[in-house]
Image (spheres, helix red, strand yellow):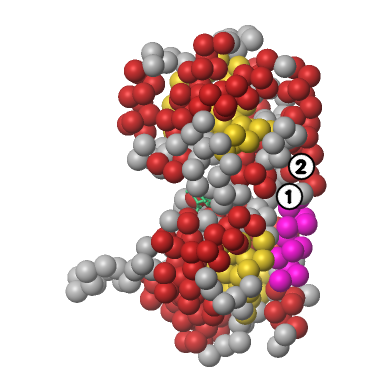
Amino acid sequence: MRLNIGITCYPTVGGSGVVATELGKLLAEKGHNIHFITSAVPFRLNRMYHNIFFHQVDVNQYSVFQYPPYDIALASKMADVIEREKLDILHVHYAIPHAVCAILGKQMAKSNVKIVTTLHGTDITVLGSDSSLTQAIKFGIEQSDAVTAVSHSLVSQTKELIAPEKSIETVYNFIDERVYRPMESIYHLKKEYGIEDGEKVIIHVSNFRPVKRVTDVINVFARIAESMPAKLFLIGDGPEMTVVCRLVEALGLEGRVLYLGKQDNLAELYAISDLKLLLSEKESFGLVALEAMACGVPCVGTDAGGIPEVIDDGKNGFIRPIGDIEAISEAAIALLTDQLLYEKVKNEAIKTVKTRFHSADIVEQYERVYDRLLKEN
Ligand code: GMT
């Protein structure tokens, strides 16, 4: 059945916006009409689709308001779009404030639109412990018609932190296999970045927030660089960058660590990378690990949150305890020095993305959630 589906997400930053946008694109390719209700055009919406529409949330900046009322403007816009476009489903990504706005928007529109909320991680693991938001998060979850979370770990954490009276099902994240796929190493790109023959490239991608423990990445890289010629690509930017730069200097790693800032064409960078490090202390899923694996770049990750649901230790990558620099370095060096092991893990990583996390299966799982709710009518 062709549905009219509204999608709200944070359009400009973060994995939750990426997943929401990719989901919208794939649902549109299956014939559904997709209405993004967001503050800006989602940055991954990089081509035209005749059945994807964008409804911009404009926030009134009237001087009496101490804070611009984004939440109210969003709820009001949702109500407009629910009514005008006869939405069947309103799928919001990130509990705060999107789930609460959806409930308000539905009431304003006096509609029977079904609300699906997808929890992405920081909306629970960071904001869930803020007592000023707990009641709102609980309300948003309980009043949604269906709630999904991106890993089993996030389902458990939500139960622990928020204790909502609502069942939450796991729907894993996915990537676009047409974009993230193994490619031949791009020789000219390696040359341009000054990568010598035989030099290994380690890559880290994040928003450089403290939870990502980027200083651990540097400390592990220092050990790798002691045992083989290697360079580290740091992709992204954020509050920890200054601390990271200082550590790189203190360890005498200047010239071996390349700060690439925010980058769009990650698949090309993965094509010239050998290993990814994801050493977070909180990570509900680790979409960046899945992206790397899809490109054939094995990962060493920590045992945080949902990372072990993506990386099977010793099979398609390695899992080591959070902050255990020695154990992480050992695993990374073993992988980079044993060609046979490397090929095995790399092939397994590619296979995992194509099987357990295939986009077609994940999109179908979301469609089944929508169908179930519409049949309950
Ligand atoms: O990693 C971040 O800090 C950004 C955050 C977001 O809200 O976009 O990412 C979360 O959602 C992603 C998509 O579901 C997950 O892959 C990330 O693991 C998750 N981040 C954390 O849990 C810290």
Where does the magenta region start and end?
358-369
Main SS, magenta region, reads helix
Q: Residue furthest bottom?
A: 110
Q: Is-magenta flag for residue 300?
A: no
Residue 221 on image: x %, y %: 51, 21
Q: Quadrant of the C terminus?
A: bottom right
Helix, strand, or loop for circle 2?
helix
Does the residue at mark 1 contact the one at mark 2 (Cβ under 8 Å)?
yes
Residue 279 disc label: none
Q: Can residue 54 be seen by looking at this rendering? A: no
**Quarter occupied by residue 74:** bottom left
Residue 197 on image: x %, y %: 63, 9
Comparing 42 with 294, the one in front is: 294
Residue ID at (78%, 57%)? 361
State whether residue 359 is above or below residue 364: above
Residue highlighted by disc 2:
352
Q: Is residue 100 left or right of residue 270?
A: left
State whether residue 13 is above or below residue 179: below
Label 1, label 2: how far apart the Cα atoms are = 7 Å
Q: Callout 2, which amino acid? A: Thr
Residue ID at (76%, 22%)? 341
